[in-house]
Amino acid sequence: MIKLSKGGAYLINGTQIVLDNADAAAQIKAETGKEISKQEAMQSTMAYTILKEHNTSGNMEKLKIKFDKLTSHDITFVGIIQTARASGLTRFPIPYVLTNCHNSLCAVGGTINEDDHMFGLTCAKRYGGVYVPPHQAVIHQYAREMLAGGGKMILGSDSHTRYGALGTMAVGEGGPELVKQLLSQTYDINMPEVVGVYLKGEPVKGVGPQDVALAIIGAVFGNGYVKNKVMEFVGPGVKNLSADFRIGIDVMTTETTCLSSIWATDENIKEFYDIHRRVEDYKELNPGEITYYDGMIEVDLSAIKPMIAMPFHPSNTYTIEELNSNLKDILHDVEEKAKVSLDGAVPYSLQDKVVNGKFMVDQGIIAGCAGGGFENICAAADILKGSYIGSDEFTLSVYPASMPVYMELIKNGCAAAILETGAVMKTAFCGPCFGAGDTPANNAFSIRHSTRNFPNREGSKLQNGQISSVALMDARSIAATAANKGVLTPATEFDGEIGKYKYHFDANIYANRVFDSKSVADESVEIKFGPNIKDWPVMGALPENLVLRVVSEIHDPVTTTDELIPSGETSSYRSNPLGLAEFALSRKDPEYVGRAKDIQKAEKARMAGEHPCQAHPDVKPVMNVVKKTFADASHENTGFGSTIFAVKPGDGSAREQAASCQKVLGGWANIANEYATKRYRSNLINWGMLPFVIEQSEQLPFKNLDYLFIPDIKKAVEEKWETITAYTVSIESDALTPFELKLGELTDEERQIILKGCLINYNRVD
């Protein structure tokens, strides 16, 4: 089904794989009559060509990328624009689309969600942007329909910013990276490795894009095969997939932890652009005659079976057939993994879901940028037609990804077919994907064609004794399960017809409702600020030395951004930095906020010109120990704050608040064995936090609530020290114990951001 090469591989004429070994050169010459160096062949990837066209550094090893367009949603655009305004923003220099698909229900915190929407509309008018009102489209569907273009690059403040199937290299990053683009700065990365995804064959009936995506995720997430790399989809199987099918696979590449994606394009993609009245934006893309990839993933589409990603990660994959045949063993395995994910906070068992030997689910959801596509919903309608979901516990909700998609489903009868079964059709909304809509009952099990199934991402709250869980599946198998009244059923068991429906895009829906400034700014427009929209607090520059208190210690194999700052109803507070920070780590470590704020008192006193020992009783004894070895250390040149330790933090969302909430609570650093994604590490840097790395060992040189002293940290950043010596401070034994930290590679600009204290300070216009 899925095969990974152990090293690099060449692709000849887009169809033949030659593994990178001692015989590779001879094989290539025999096939093509040409000799080519590996370096030359690396430049034949589609990714290399697009990156070169957008690189401004003149050095393809050290990229400085300028994007063609930007996109954000209503959880992120307020903070982004507020940060850019503090740095002197006068107009959006490139097209910037503000969508409203996350905080759309306006049900939490009174007026604050709609206040954010009005902020977005007035900013689009003042600075020359595009504003997509609530319920019109989810962020990525609008981008596919109206923004993507062959050979272009788009940056979005959402991790699932992926438009590779349409020939667009798109990257999901934290808000500060969009701020840089708004200030005409660049996105700075080393040239990423490119991994080929070679598709062959054709999916069987009942297998959908989520099945293919989950099979790939299951094969590559755990081993980091594509981490921070570009996935390039090639091979003869590409032509056997419709545009919608490719989009459905592509959007889920985020869950592999890759940097971006790109696909070969053809007539199917040209037709997509033509349908959306933008055929001029189509560009044919193909790898070169001889192309080198840093790895190769071979996917036999015909061998893919209906898949399920069990709680609590998209990589926890099985075939539905395998699960149904081994319920006892697999459910036990899931329950054991849950002990780690849930920290034993609540009892968790799936055994009660087995009734008469069959696995029963409580809820089905088809939604968002992954599931809400036209073909997914049409296929679900065909499978459901003539069936009824019943009047018991099982429910089914379907969210088309945009109003134009919804309109076509109404016109072609698929919406009516779904509604007749007892299912519910809803408007475009991302809520089910991050815990702000369709939260199941306690102990319920939900199957969803959406993007993630992290703990609590469906909306339950461990701290309140609640737990429900989500498995990811394709819309087709969700429909088959719904038709079977909640009995887990693969769509390959459906023996009816799944039709092919022609899509007609109604451009008037957007023309009549979306505000488009056509990139014309209007300085006369007054920005509307709701009472919850707050400026960022003042943040100080990096001092010469640091005293850090470890205020949370997390030993899970991976820590998600949802655990660092919960999603769901907390999203409504993301326009209020201090208000949102109260929720930081609340579902993982409820003591974190209090501990961080406690040591922050010392730094606040120091910044106010007072002696920090008056604000915190530990300052004097800690500094007494430090001064015995470092006599020059004082409260004038030493900052005080907090840090957390996590094994591998930052999987999942691009949300910058996972870092900014720590920063506004006095965080100066994270210490990790590694960072799960570039996105999270970049967010730390842009908020002036030190992304320390410590070598993995059986025992850390510190524990929770210990104090750490890091001398000459400012000099270490300025002078690019490879290794930094830190010390655990023991008041009891009156001693310092040394250990080593590293910062990893930082660009000169990133060092300056850290030294200034954050991106706002780096760019601030007084």
Image: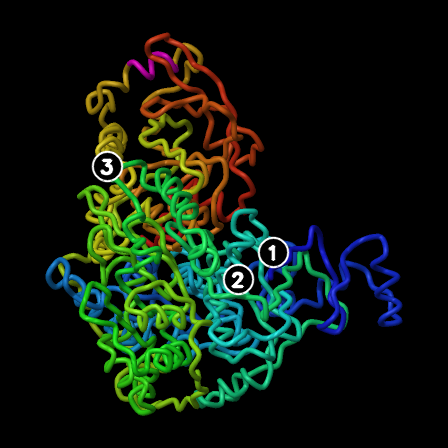
The answer to if 623 sits in the magenta stretch is yes
Mark 3 Cα-neighbour bin, 10 Å: few <14, some 14–19, many ≥20: some
Coordinates of residue 332 in the picture (x, y in percent): 39, 43
Region of the chain picked out in magenta, as a range: 621-626
Q: Between marks 1 and 2, how big is the CA–CA gap?
A: 10 Å
| Residue occupied by mark 1 | 192
Left/right placement of residue 355 relative to residue 288 reads left
- Residue at image x 31%, y 70%? 482
- Residue at image x 49%, y 85%? 272
Which sits in the foreground, 574 or 524? 574
Amino acid type of disc 3?
Answer: Pro
Q: Between marks 2 and 3, how big is the CA–CA gap?
A: 34 Å
Which sits in the foreground, 123 or 203? 203
Disc nearer the start of the sequence (1/2):
1
| Residue occupied by mark 2 | 260
Disc nearer the start of the sequence (3/1):
1
Mark 1 Cα-neighbour bin, 10 Å: few <14, some 14–19, many ≥20: many
